[in-house]
Amino acid sequence: MSGIHIKNDVIAYLEKTLLPEKQKKIEEHLSSCSSCQALVKRMSAVYFSGDKQEVPELTPYFYTRICAQLENEQQSTWEIPLPVLRSLRPVAAGLFVLTAITFTIFLSNYILSGNQFKMNTKVGSSEMSYEYYLENSGDLMLNTIVSNEN
Amino acid sequence: MTDADLLKSLAGKDENAFRFLVEKYQAMVFKACFHILNNYEDAEDVAQDTFVEAYLSIASFRGDAKISTWLYRIAINKSKNLLRKNRWQLLMQRFDKFLPGEKSVVFDAEDHSAHDDMHLYEKNEDQKVLWKAIESLPENQRIAFTLSKYDELSYQEIAEAMQTSLSAVESLIHRAKLNLQKKLVIYFSEK
Ligand SMILES: [Zn+2]
């Protein structure tokens, strides 16, 4: 038997999981082949070295650390929206200003038109953009006043 | 306390039951992670994440497996994620250093990066060679092999933990041993 065959079976030989016949053949070969003997010796030392290795001790603070992580994870479900909310601040401020302007315009329109929102029925079509409305709201109010007088 | 009693208490978010779970299974989970990852700090982090996920996902556990199997499943998934992340980082490091990729095919027991020094500090020369070879195995072979050899799980227990068939586990462990043998024989012939 050549060394090539031993190379393919050396772990199985060491674990004694080969068929008895093959196990015996390898033993016979080893008795007369020093290079295969050396390989088996080296493989045995390395392969079984893992069995002797101890597992290090776990930190005594393991449970405390788990509790701390759990607390963080549970808090974070509430903290996640905060950065999103922060990034939405300018948008919220813009919306607030627009709402305030709109409210002021409608309020003044309401006062000037004698407590009636007639402007909407006359020129407030769905095609009219908000910008157009802002730019022309003075004229619109005049129109409303005129229409009211009529 | 039986598994069923423990599960019932855990479902009610009973803190004492959770503490009992951690104390009963922490060594088992850490040991498996330590063998799969071959790194103390990583194993501790993954073991910690395993119990955190167990606590958060207790409601979705149907009790169709033993608690130990359920914990092994979480630990294996988390270990796999970390192995993939580490592999990606290593790939990026190699890319940065313009090292040829062929190096990863075999392995070099002397190739100690800063990462390796952290987890090889307690090993002798033979153990360093062995673990380098185990680390170079494909992920599932590495997991099945270490669970069998160093955590002493039966093939059936490994199949349940890895959520695969018994024959798949037999094949994984068989191929793991052949690969280890091949890598070690090449390593010895080069020395
Ligand atoms: Zn020979």
Image (cartoon, coloured by chain):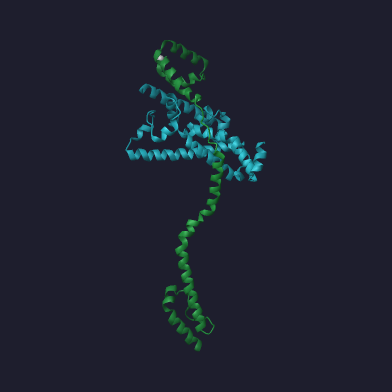
Q: Is residue B1 left or right of residue B127?
A: right
Residue sitting at the far bottom: A150
Q: Is residue A68 left or right of residue B127?
A: right
- The residue depicted at 44 percent of the width and 10 percent of the height is A31
* Count of numbered labels shown in the rendering: 0
Answer whether residue A129 is visible to the viewer in this image: no
Query: According to the rendering, which colour does chain A have?
Result: green
As drawn, B177 above or below A1: below
Q: Looking at the image, in which quadrant does ligand 1 appear?
A: top left
- The residue depicted at 51 percent of the width and 56 percent of the height is A81
Q: Is residue B18 left or right of residue B179?
A: right
Query: According to the rendering, which colour does chain B have?
Result: cyan
- The residue depicted at 54 percent of the width and 40 percent of the height is B50
Coordinates of residue A53 in the picture (x, y in percent): 49, 26
- The residue depicted at 65 percent of the width and 39 percent of the height is B6
Coordinates of residue B178 in the picture (x, y in percent): 45, 25
Q: Quadrant of the N terminus of chain A?
A: top left
Coordinates of residue A111 in the picture (x, y in percent): 51, 82
